[in-house]
Image (cartoon, rainbow, N blue to C red):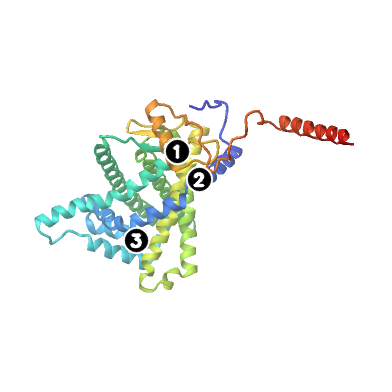
Amino acid sequence: MVQKDKSKRFNLTGLWHILKKSFAGFGEDKVPKLSASLAYYTIFSLGPLILVIISLAGVFLGREAIEGSIFNQLRGFVGADAAAQIQQIVKSASLSGKSTTAATIGVITLLVGATSVFAEIQDSINTIWGLKAKPGKQGVLIMLKNRLLSFGVIGSLGFLLLVSLAVTAIIEGLNERLLARFPDVSIILMYVINLVITLGVITLLFAVIFKVLPDAAIRWRDVWAGSIATAILFMIGKFAIGLYIGKSEVGSTYGTAGSLVVLILWVYYSAIILYFGAEFTKAYALEYGSDIRPNKYAVVVQAVTVEGGQQSLRSHARSMENAKTSGSLTLPKAEPLNQPAPEPEGMGSAETLRSLAVLAVSRLVGWTKERH
């Protein structure tokens, strides 16, 4: 464990240092590739995911109210066409009107599909934080545990949605009263309040993701720094992504598939922001926080650089097997490929070769003098 300087304070210089480390990790961990993978999974999980959230939150406020709120929010993020596409996907995933057997199979498929996107997020953040699940006989139990955690995050989404709707209703009631007395001030005030509440809800969501999903033991105070930074980037990215998609007319380029392409792009860029936030959280926890440790279900992945030249795959496999057997992570020196032939004994150094050359020249000069 790296010992930290307790006197260090997080300031602008520290922020710049954390950002540099985050961007370095962004490239090393191949975040764009992880984001593309998440976008692919999301397309298949989005319908079941939204349907489960609607079912959970609809118990308290009614299905129609929750559904209308979700799709209104989606229109603000991805546009009307993509939101309509999502709505159609959700309707296709509905289980109403099916037989008992089909409904049972559908529920299982629905839950697996809804939790797949969070399982992918978990695996990606584990990769970014240098962790992986322990291999062995408990693999099935770990998978079930991860699915339950993913379902718990979905439940948290439903709860945050309920809180957001309740707060929105309160704000609208206050807005009507303030608008009657202070028409000029109330518009700006309500906009600021709505912005702060939205930022708070998104921060809570990212905090739950960073704290619950990865196979890591990390303190809440370290999670909050990364969650706030990610939420701010997400709010900025929301407008930037919307501006890019609107100005580039990427949807019209692909014809009837345009709304789906817009949705994939939005998820892809949002995933980049999420994983950059994971890089930021990692850098902050290592530099100013309490470190990140694997939980009892995970181990730390250590990258080992092998010295001594290039190593063949067979040699590397043997080295890893020897390391497992001995319980040590120290790898033996690799044998370089295309190794030159060994030098004759006694002629290994440049000084020896130079002495032999001088001796040969002197003998040649002496032999020449004797001839003359």
Q: Where is residue 232 in the image (x, y as percent from the top left)?
A: 48, 48
Q: Earlier in the sequence, mark 2 or mark 1?
A: 2
| Residue under label 2 | 28
* Spatial CA span between label 3 and label 2: 38 Å
Residue situated furthest front in the rendering: 371
Q: Residue 315 falls in which quadrant of the image?
A: top left
Q: Residue 307 falls in which quadrant of the image?
A: top right
Q: Position of residue 248 (x, y in %)?
A: 49, 68
User: Is disc 2 placed on a helix, strand or loop?
Assistant: helix
Q: Can you tell which of label 1 and label 3 is closer to the viewer?
A: 1
Residue name at image x 36 percent, y 68 percent: 81
User: Is disc 3 placed on a helix, strand or loop?
Assistant: helix
Kind of residue indicated by mark 3: Asn
Kind of residue indicated by mark 1: Ser
Depth check: 365 or 320 in front? 365
Kind of residue indicated by mark 2: Glu
Depth check: 162 or 189 in front? 162
Q: Earlier in the sequence, mark 3 or mark 2?
A: 2
User: Is disc 1 placed on a helix, strand or loop?
Assistant: helix
Q: Can you tell which of label 3 and label 2 is closer to the viewer?
A: 2
Position of 269 with respect to 50 (left or right) is right
Position of 237 with respect to 258 (left or right) is right
Which of the labelled discs sits on residue 72, or is there none? 3
Residue 59 in sight from this viewpoint: yes
Which of the labelled discs sits on residue 144, or is there none? none
